Amino acid sequence: MVSNMGHIDFKPDDFGEKSITLEMEHHDAVELVREVCKKHGFGIAVEFSPSELLNEKVGTDRTPYYVLGACNPKIADRALNITDKIGGLFPCNMVIWEERPGIQTVYHVSIMKIAMLLGMAPDDKEWQGILEETGNIVGAVFDELASRS
């Protein structure tokens, strides 16, 4: 995994990267992702618009960018029972940004996989169970987004 340039080359599956393009307006994409996440067991613990914040605070002209902080409380509780450090990565984010009007990208990386890669969580049977469960849920979210786009 270490390249000749001294950095680690990870493949998207190593850190649970998922992405999909939706053909709809930004607000509609945010609402759809919120709805689908909730349907599959994620509550939305926090949400915010970095683009609105930056446009207001530093006078930028960023295109719409939104973060939904998704959380499955039962899985979060299991993860915290294994490692307190996982809280440094909470919540699982679903990020929605506008590529251009009417075209949105939804992006996610697995905090559970990242925690294991960084040594914040063990590579054991119990953690593998969490990875499998969260992977299945996130997969279902992205499958449904694909079917509804």
Image (spheres, rainbow, N blue to C red):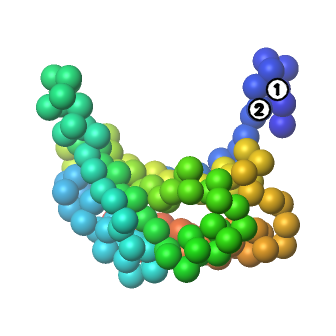
Please tell me which of labels 2 and 1 falls first in the chain. Answer: 1
User: Please, what secondary structure does the residue beneath circle 2 have?
Assistant: loop
The residue depicted at 44 percent of the width and 74 percent of the height is 42
Viewer-proximal residue among 53 and 14: 53
> Given the image, on which type of amino acid does mark 2 rest?
Ile
Q: How many marks?
A: 2
The residue lying toward the viewer, choosing from 56 and 77, is 77
Query: Which quarter of the rendering shows the N terminus?
Result: top right
Which residue is depicted at the point 77% across and 48% down?
Answer: 119
Q: Is there CB contact under 8 Å for labels 2 and 1?
A: yes
Name the quadrant of the C terminus.
bottom left
Residue 38 higher or lower than 107, as above or below? below
On the image, the x and y values in percent for residue 63 come to: 23, 36
Residue located 79% across and 74% down the image: 126
Q: Which residue is mark 2?
A: 8
In percent of width and height, residue 87 lies at 56, 57
Which residue in the rendered view is the most extreme toward the top?
Answer: 5
**Residue that label 1 marks:** 3
The disc at residue 30 is none
